[in-house]
Image (cartoon, rainbow, N blue to C red):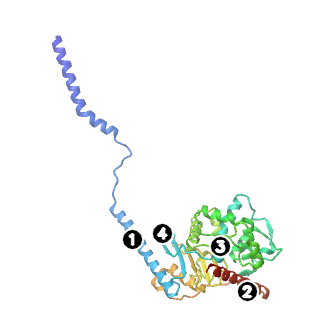
Amino acid sequence: MNQKGIAYLYLLIIVASGFLLVKYIPSIYQSTHQPKSIITPQVFPQADQKIKEATASDQMQQAKLEKYLTVEAALLGVSDNISLSFKDFDHSKEVNIEPTRQWIPASTIKAFVMVEVFRQRDLGLIDFDREVTIDSINVVPTELETDEFPRLREGTRVTIYQLIETMIIQSDNTAYNTLLDILDRRNINLALKNIGITETVVGEKLNLDETQFQQDLQVAGRQSDTTTAKDLTTLFDLLYNKKIAHSAEILSIFKRQKINNMIPVYLPSNTLVAHKTGDWSSIYHDAGVVFKPDDPFVLSIMTNSGDPNIVAQIAKVAYFQTADSIGQTFQKNTPQADNQKSSSQLITLANYQTMLKSLQKKLQRNFQLLRHLT
């Protein structure tokens, strides 16, 4: 082949190669540079519809429950005198009636102390087995005495863990007052804020006489106690969902509650309730976890109704969640242990007089404060 023929052959090869590059390289490039992780999503219209239906059903059930509770409160005459916070763990139902209204907490304030007492144990600041001596500045009339937890008197030696049990299980005021001195109420309030409980103040001892009251006024961090239904629900929600250290151990103590004259009264007899009550004068509160089979919930009810049965009636509607439960009085479920004695059986004449004097002085102080403000 002469030189001219060779030149034509090379030219033909170059043209053919260019044609192949133009035709095939773009498709090769696209196929090799597609993101491997991108997968076309599959649409399941039936599953999506079921989710929407379930959400709509939950919303409808929540609206019904809110209506039932509102009607029950109206029938009981406490529409303007109640705070309620309900949270269903399994179905995400929440019902609130004046949840951030500030209340005198009475003995529900003791529930918040549990957060700090276990935190200080973890830090090595206190030892639950350490014995302490009950000081006269903390000895006050209390609500209940049982054979399991006898009355705490001046000079009694008890462990810190016994104080915790007595404070919660039978709402002992002397145990609570003693723990405030051990823990420092400023630490308690800081610990509460750190877990999102922001509307509660643990600031004063309970049931003090005038001398004890004047001494307590000098203590650092002393303030008036206050809380809300929202904060109580937050506390028990955190405990149920194990968001607080030693939640199971703490709840086990609340489950042993001996004062069961509110939330548990009209519930089925085998219903477990981990809760804390509080009452003072006409104030009746109760809050805790109701372990309803397959549908547990937390409920906080705060009233100034003068009647613990009103709390029980509202808790009944929260449990059964039916129109039939509204306005109905079910059979009470109030078993009392053989060794349990009510405070009315145990308060001596001297203690009764002390309680009357303490109440009288508190009323006088409040009247003087009111007159000063007006």
Q: Spatial distance from mark 3 to mark 2, Cα to Cα? A: 21 Å
| 4 and 2 marks in contact (CB < 8 Å) | no
The residue where tag 1 is placed is: 56
On the question of residue 342 being in view, the answer is no
Q: Which residue is mark 3?
A: 225
- Tell me whether the residue at label 1 lies in contact with that at label 3, contact meaning CB atoms closer than 8 angstroms: no
Please name the residue that numbered disc 2 is placed on: 356
Question: 4 and 318: which one is in front?
Answer: 318
Q: Quadrant of residue 337?
A: bottom right
Taking depth in this image into account, of 360 and 22 the one nearest to the observer is: 360
Judge left or right: residue 157 versus residue 25.
right
User: Circle 3 sits in a helix, a strand or a loop, which is it?
Assistant: loop
- Marks 1/4 in contact by CB < 8 Å: the verdict is no
Residue type pointed to by label 3? Asp
Residue 92: which disc? 4
Numbered tag placed on residue 190 in the rendering: none
Q: Where does the C terminus fall, quadrant-wise?
A: bottom right
- Depicted 271 relative to depicted 32: above or below: below
Separation (CA) of disc 4 from disc 2 = 46 Å
Q: Along the polypeptide, which appears first: circle 2 or circle 1? A: 1
Q: CA distance from mark 3 to mark 4?
A: 31 Å
- Observer-side mark, 1 or 3, equals 3
Does label 4 or label 2 sit earlier along the sequence? 4
Q: Residue 319 appears at what percent x and percent y?
A: 52, 79
> Would you say 344 lies left or right of 157 here?
left
Q: Earlier in the sequence, mark 3 or mark 4?
A: 4
Closer to the chain start, of discs 1 and 3, is 1
The quarter of the displayed image where residue 149 is located: bottom right
Residue type, numbered disc 1 = Ala
Residue 256 relative to residue 174: left or right:
left
